[in-house]
Image (cartoon, grey):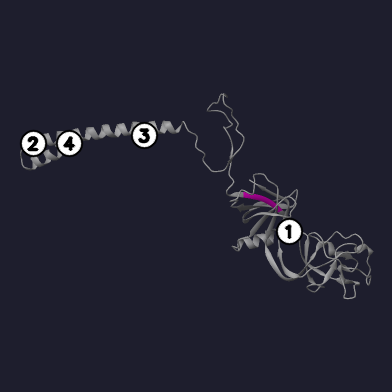
Amino acid sequence: MNLERFKLLFKEGVIAQQQLDTQAALVGQFDGAIASDQGQIDNAKLQLTYSRITAPISGRIGLRLVDAGNIVHASDTNGLLVITQLQPVSVIFSLPQDQLPQVNAKLRSGVQLVVDAYDRDDTAKIASGKLQTIDNQIDVTTGTYKLKSIFSNEDNALFPNQFVNVHLLVDIKRNLIIVPTAAIQRGPQGTYVYAAGNDNTAKIRAVTIAQTTGNSVGVSAGLNPGEIVVIDGQDKLQDGTNISTTPATGSNGAGHNSAPQPTAQGARQSGSSPKGNAGGSPR
């Protein structure tokens, strides 16, 4: 305030320039003292932050590595605990090298490939994610290559280092007849199935396999939608053998031990889903 007064007095010629400069220097000295005090306050706040440990990421804390009463040093290699990030979580899985061109072509074309994680029994789907990238080399000992997928894992269904079976949907093949893998037989004439005729007799049908995924086989020729095929007891059958059909029990239609067990399968879409037989390991 005195500096502003001195400026007005200097304009009116009441005081000399020296008095105005002296007052301005005094104001600058006070501003410097305030800045120095503010620096000391900021330094004290910084020291306070060192008394609290803040997690750099969100995740799940494991078992503590230090108990109350332990002596710790700044040079200790182990920390207090380990935090594992769960959202998102990555799943690493392997596929045979023969399937690399098909997967790589889809990935380079910009197609977002869907990855599903199933439980150890490969029956219940745990979560769905997206394929992120492919490793830059093939493992010469196993003939497989690694792929990395990302899962949002919002419900924490996937756990670090959990074993999962991975299904990667690469392509969709349409107009195929889906039959259980147990129905497919192989002989000198190639692949065939036993189909139930209208007179309840087994008929040999030569089929052409277009896709095999899990426990299902996609047949492109040899069967019609809705036909009944035998999935159990084929070793007792010949072309023209009388059979009795019973409703399928369980997920694969098996379970009848007194007669060959046919099961009806209709035409539906079949996804080409190469599966990593080694499972995935969320990391």
Residue 91 located within the stretch drawn in magenta: yes
Residue position marked by numbered label 4 in the rendering: 24
**Residue 217 drawn above or below residue 141:** below
List x then y, in percent, for residue 224: 80, 74
Q: Which residue is mark 3?
A: 42
First in sequence, mark 2 or 4: give its number. 2
56 vs 127: above or below: above
Asked if marks 1 and 2 touch (Cβ < 8 Å), the reply is no
Residue at the disc numbered 1:
98
- Secondary structure mostly seen in magenta is strand
From the image, state whether disc 2 or disc 3 is nearer to you.
Answer: 3
Q: Which residues are magenta?
A: 90-94
Question: Distance from label 2 to label 4 (Cα)?
Answer: 13 Å
Q: Earlier in the sequence, mark 3 or mark 1?
A: 3
The C terminus sits in image quarter: top right
Q: Are marks 3 and 1 in contact (CB under 8 Å)?
A: no
Query: Disc 2 marks which residue?
Result: 16
Q: Amino acid at mark 1?
A: Asp
- Location of residue 248 by image quarter: bottom right
Q: Nearer the viewer, mark 1 or mark 4?
A: 4
Decide which of tag 1 and tag 4 comes sooner along the chain.
4
Q: Please report the residue visible at 63 percent of the width from the left and 53 percent of the height from the top.
A: 149
Left or right of 239 in this view: 220 = left
